[in-house]
Image (spheres, rainbow, N blue to C red):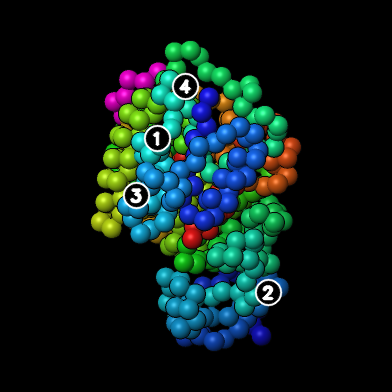
């Protein structure tokens, strides 16, 4: 398993150090110092999210035949060796934790994307069977993300604060991947109080509270 | 000082005057005071003199005259459910209340003109509360139109499947059942 993260900006670079320490395995991190980092937007949030959406195309040293796990930089675990029990079915191409709930949107494109899946994708923790699948997904994802970015100034109900996940879903409306939904324990993204996190049996959490600088 | 027994209403002729309502001191705001708060209101809008902040520095929530059921609040049955709050951005208004509590009479949600998500942090979360269909729809009706990305989560409220979602989606909100 190869662990990948993206940390664009000083605070995400600090956060990813926490991820590396808690995962206990090598983590390949894309930063602004990476050779394949190319700034595409002056807004650090947009720039960072773009590189997340395109992460699989931004590394030179990924083994193409070993599965990848992408982790958001602000993830952390409280258990030693947190990935030791992680597995997916052999035929799975792409796996992630879904959000719960049925979403109703003010616009068609996101409604179509949601209805195609039946859930919203959480992109904080994702499994890819191999680099080629990750690259194919990321190429479409990054393209869709930039199309969303182009709408920020002109369209209602579209802004950088939707982050990257709707772009991922829009890009995969017609996908043919074999998807496996992961249990919430692999990214318990809703938990945000110290008390809730400590008493949880989940493996990974996210801090969410960064100010982007 | 005048004592009001009914919920105060806007009166532009009383700008600057103070009164008591449910043991708290209120005043009728002037237009500059309202503008300074960034509220979409006009002169004479009534508001408590002392506003409470419930853990969210960019949200001003009314406290005291009734028991509002936000995080840290102490809910009582049939609370007036009042929001006086804005800011440059208003991420994550969460309402917590035990299922035994029935909230009633939402007020002033039209002031929430800056509700906006931040990734997985939703603008407005009332999941796991006992909030009724009629209260949720009243909140939807009061909320202003938005062109932002603002999500309202009503999951696991007792009548969620009966709520007219289109009231909110037609104003630009995302609603999660």
Query: Is disc 2 on the same chain as disc 3?
Result: no
State the residue at coordinates (54%, 55%). Answer: A11
Q: Earlier in the sequence, mark 3 or mark 1?
A: 3
Q: Mark 4 sits on what residue?
A: A66
Q: Is residue A210 visible?
A: yes
What is the C-alpha distance between the residues marked 3 and 2? Answer: 57 Å
Query: Is disc 1 on the same chain as disc 3?
Result: yes
- Give the residues in magenta: A173-180
Image height check: is A25 above or below B22? above
Image height check: is B153 above or below B34? above
Looking at the rendered structure, the number of numbered marks drawn on it comes to: 4
State the residue at coordinates (36%, 36%). Answer: A57
Q: Which mark is residue A60?
A: 1
Q: Mark 3 sits on what residue?
A: A38
What is the C-alpha distance between the residues marked 3 and 1? Answer: 14 Å
Q: Quadrant of the N terminus of chain B?
A: bottom right
Report if residue A174 lies within the magenta region: yes
Q: Mark 2 sits on what residue?
A: B24
Q: Secondary structure at mark 1?
A: loop
Q: Secondary structure at mark 2?
A: strand
């Amino acid at each position: 398993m190869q662990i990948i993260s993206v940390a664009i900006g000083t605070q995400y670079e600090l956060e990813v150090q926490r991820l590396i320490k808690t995962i206990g395995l090598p983590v390949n991190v894309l930063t602004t110092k990476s050779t394949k980092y190319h700034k595409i937007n002056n807004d650090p949030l947009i720039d960072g999210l773009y590189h997340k959406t395109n992460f699989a195309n931004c590394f030179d040293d990924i083994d193409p035949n070993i599965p990848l796990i992408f982790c958001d930089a602000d993830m952390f675990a409280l258990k030693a060796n947190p990935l030791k029990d992680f597995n997916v079915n052999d035929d799975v191409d792409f796996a992630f934790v879904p959000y719960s709930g049925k979403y109703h949107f003010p616009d068609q494109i996101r409604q179509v994307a949601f209805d195609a899946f039946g859930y919203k994708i959480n992109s904080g923790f994702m499994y890819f069977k191999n680099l080629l699948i990750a690259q194919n997904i990321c190429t479409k994802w990054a393209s869709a993300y930039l199309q969303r970015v182009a709408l920020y100034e002109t369209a209602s109900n579209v802004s950088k604060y939707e982050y990257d996940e709707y772009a991922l879903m829009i890009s995969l409306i017609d996908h043919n991947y074999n998807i496996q939904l992961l249990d919430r324990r692999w990214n318990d993204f809703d938990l945000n109080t110290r008390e809730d996190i400590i008493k949880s049996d989940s493996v990974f959490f996210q801090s969410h509270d960064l100010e982007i600088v | 000082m005048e004592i009001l027994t009914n919920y105060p209403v806007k009166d532009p002729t009383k700008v600057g005057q103070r009164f008591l309502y449910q043991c708290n001191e209120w005043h009728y705001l002037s237009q500059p005071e309202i503008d300074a708060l960034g509220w979409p209101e006009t002169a004479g809008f009534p508001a408590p003199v002392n506003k409470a902040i419930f853990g969210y520095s960019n949200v001003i929530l009314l406290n005291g005259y009734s028991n509002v059921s936000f995080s840290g609040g102490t809910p009582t049955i049939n609370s007036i459910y009042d929001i006086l709050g804005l800011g440059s951005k208003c991420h994550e208004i969460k309402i917590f209340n035990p299922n035994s509590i029935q909230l009633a009479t939402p007020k002033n949600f039209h002031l929430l003109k800056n509700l906006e998500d931040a990734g997985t942090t939703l603008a407005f979360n009332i999941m796991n509360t006992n909030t009724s269909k009629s209260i949720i729809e009243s909140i939807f009706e009061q909320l202003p139109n938005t062109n932002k990305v603002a999500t309202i989560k009503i999951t696991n409220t007792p009548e969620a499947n009966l709520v007219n979602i289109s009231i909110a989606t037609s104003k630009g909100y995302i609603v999660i059942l």
